[in-house]
């Protein structure tokens, strides 16, 4: 026991566990309960929520807006995280190590800056970039008046999220590539293997675990990201309304708490599936 | 032979060229949105347009005269500092106890709460958390918001700190005990100094997480005087919906500096470390 009695140990653990119970466990369980109620912020169901069983879930599944936001979320996560951040992050990690020191430092610092600045600030920077009349992008491309957020809302949030999150993948892949033994790379070179073959036969087996970890983490983060709301408000006409934005608009803005909870629970289940997958991989790598 | 050598040289030059072309394009893509942040605060006529070179500090006068701007930075400091303090203290004591006492199912418990924290995110739990604080009449209560934020960070913090606690040699504590120190004293005066890098990492990480958090303060605080920097920026518009550029640009700069400084500090002192679930 190393001198710390079980009684004291429990006292040391209780504050942390109490907060976790109150703000993580309880909300998750309450979502389960709220999801079977017709419960609105205003009106007759505000005072006395009515039990409606699985009605909210069938309503959600029948709501074209819900199907729309599931598809949008899939596209958003797939394009911006799984392909965009992953691909660009790896390319940067793999190529910059061969560039001159000052180039590497400059590019690294700029990519990192886009990751560590506060969300509200970067959203405003992107509004300045994409603005219809004075925006930098239109000035550069010579397309005055082009309304990027209105005409291409999904592309806007995808490109934005690649810009915002690539740093993490770049850092993780840099660390992973540093761990590939140089002797193996030397051997491959001596045998005259080209860059693609070297990658497949030498590098890939070493970093496979990191690729999985990275992909799952950025998937989880992008799936739960609320920043698209700050950039496009989910519009125009629901065209960039990912699941978190949909939950916000139906439950907090629209006041349908029961219905919103049903959607939240669906999100929780998707998160659970992604996280379980991640933990399994972690444990397999650890053991 | 000469041709092969020539090919190799051409290939080498081409690959360098491609490399720097790629680096250049990436640099433009990532730097383009940032230019506005660096140039506009000092521009004579700030707008969405990236300004022609000009220099004035007048915009900072407007920032200082705004009744909400500096106060919101103070609010952010309260939220971030309070959360960091609670996260370090609670995660520290819990991680210490879990590291020293062999409770049955301890590792399973740690994994379970880590799993929980990655699935019960701010966006997935916004409805029950909003409703809970609404029914308890705790909307606009900063302490309640700090507790909510701490709850979300504790699992990862405990997980990371337990690794640090495991490395503290037990002999240190035993000799302290021989001299009659209580467990709390041992934790404060013997264990904490040894794991200080871990505690500092958690504190900085908590500050950065809370500093940028928009959603939770947005739904849980309604009084403008209490809102943190992340939320208050959305009020810097005039009646016609036009952004107050002088105010927004200077405020953005002021609000960004602390996270960049925190990052540089951590990076310099401890290097960048990868630990599960961290996003800075």
Image (tube, helix red, strand yellow):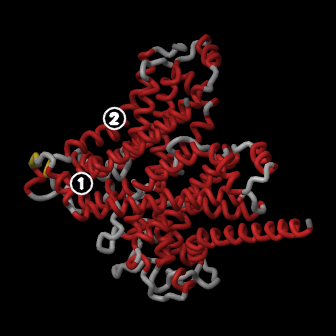
Which quadrant of the view contains residue A70? bottom left
**Residue B65 drawn above or below residue B212:** below
Q: Secondary structure at mark 1?
A: helix
**Looking at the picture, does residue A67 appear above or below residue B204?**
below
| Observer-nearest of A114 and B178 | A114
The structure residue drawn at horizontal position 52% and vertical position 24%, both measured from the top left corner, is B99
Of A86 and B89, the residue lying toward us: A86
Q: Position of residue A226 (x, y in %)?
A: 39, 59
Residue B211 relative to residue B269: left or right: left
Mark 2 sits on what residue? A21
The residue that disc 1 covers is A260
- The chain identifier of the residue carrying mark 2 reads A
Camera-side residue of A177 and A193: A193
* Pointer 2 or 1: first along the chain: 2
Q: Is residue B17 left or right of residue B207?
A: right
Name the image quarter holding residue B59: bottom right
**Secondary structure at numbered mark 2:** helix
Q: Position of residue B251 (x, y in %)?
A: 51, 68
Res. B18 in view: yes
Chain hosting mark 1: A
Vertical comparison of B82 with A41: above or below? above
Q: Indicate the position of residue A112 as horizontal and vertical percent values.
A: 61, 59
Is disc 2 surrounded by few (<14), some (14 to 19) or many (20+) residues within 10 Å? some
Residue at x-position 44% and y-position 16%: A6
């Amino acid at each position: 026991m190393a001198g710390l009695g079980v009684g004291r140990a429990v006292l040391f653990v209780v504050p942390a566990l109490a907060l976790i119970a109150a703000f993580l466990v309880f909300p998750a369980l309450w979502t389960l309960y709220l999801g079977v109620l017709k419960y609105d912020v205003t009106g007759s169901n505000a005072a006395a929520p009515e039990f409606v069983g699985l009605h909210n879930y069938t309503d959600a599944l029948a709501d074209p807006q819900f199907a729309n936001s599931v598809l949008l979320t899939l596209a958003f996560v797939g394009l911006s995280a799984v392909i965009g951040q992953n691909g660009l992050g790896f390319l940067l990690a793999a190529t910059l190590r061969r560039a001159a020191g000052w180039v590497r430092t400059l590019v690294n610092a700029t990519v990192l800056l886009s990751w560590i600045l506060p969300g509200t600030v970067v959203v405003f920077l992107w509004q300045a970039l994409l603005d219809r009349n004075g925006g930098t992008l239109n000035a550069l491309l010579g397309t005055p008046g082009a309304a990027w957020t209105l005409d291409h809302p999904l592309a806007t949030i995808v490109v934005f999220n690649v810009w915002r999150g690539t740093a993490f993948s770049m850092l993780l892949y840099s660390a992973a590539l540093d761990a590939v033994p140089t002797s193996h790379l030397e051997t491959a070179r001596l045998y005259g293997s080209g860059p693609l073959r070297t990658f497949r036969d030498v590098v890939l087996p070493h970093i496979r675990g990191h690729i999985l970890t990275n992909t799952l983490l950025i998937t989880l983060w992008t799936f739960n990201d609320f920043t698209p709301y700050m950039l496009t408000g989910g519009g125009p006409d629901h065209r960039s309304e990912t699941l978190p934005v949909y939950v916000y608009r139906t439950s907090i803005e629209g006041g349908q708490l029961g219905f919103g909870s049903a959607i939240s629970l669906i999100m929780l289940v998707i998160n659970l599936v992604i996280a379980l997958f991640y933990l399994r991989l972690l444990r397999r790598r650890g053991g | 032979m000469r041709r092969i050598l020539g090919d190799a040289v051409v290939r080498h030059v081409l690959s360098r060229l491609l490399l720097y072309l790629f680096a250049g394009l990436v640099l433009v893509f990532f730097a383009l949105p940032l230019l506005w942040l660096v140039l506009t605060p000092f521009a004579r006529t700030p707008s969405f347009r990236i300004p022609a070179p000009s220099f004035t500090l007048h915009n900072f006068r407007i920032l200082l005269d705004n009744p909400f701007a500096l106060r919101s930075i103070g609010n952010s400091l309260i939220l971030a500092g309070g959360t960091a303090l609670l996260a370090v203290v609670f995660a520290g004591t819990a991680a210490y106890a879990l590291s020293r006492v062999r409770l049955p199912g301890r590792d399973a418990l740690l994994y379970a709460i880590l799993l929980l924290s990655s699935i019960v995110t701010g966006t997935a739990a916004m409805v029950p958390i909003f409703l809970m604080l609404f029914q308890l009449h705790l909307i606009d209560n900063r302490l309640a918001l700090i507790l909510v934020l701490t709850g979300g960070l504790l699992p990862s913090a405990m997980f990371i700190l337990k690794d640090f606690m495991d490395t503290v040699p037990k002999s240190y504590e035993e000799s302290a005990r021989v001299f009659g120190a209580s467990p709390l004293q041992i934790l404060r005066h013997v264990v904490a100094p040894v794991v200080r890098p871990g505690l500092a990492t958690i504190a900085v990480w908590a500050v950065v997480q809370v500093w940028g958090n928009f959603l939770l303060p947005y739904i849980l605080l309604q009084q403008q005087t209490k809102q943190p920097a992340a939320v208050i920026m959305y009020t810097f518009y005039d009646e016609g919906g036009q952004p107050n550029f002088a105010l927004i640009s200077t405020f953005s700069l002021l609000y960004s500096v602390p996270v960049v400084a925190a990052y540089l500090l951590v990076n310099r002192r401890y290097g960048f470390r990868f630990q599960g679930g961290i996003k800075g």
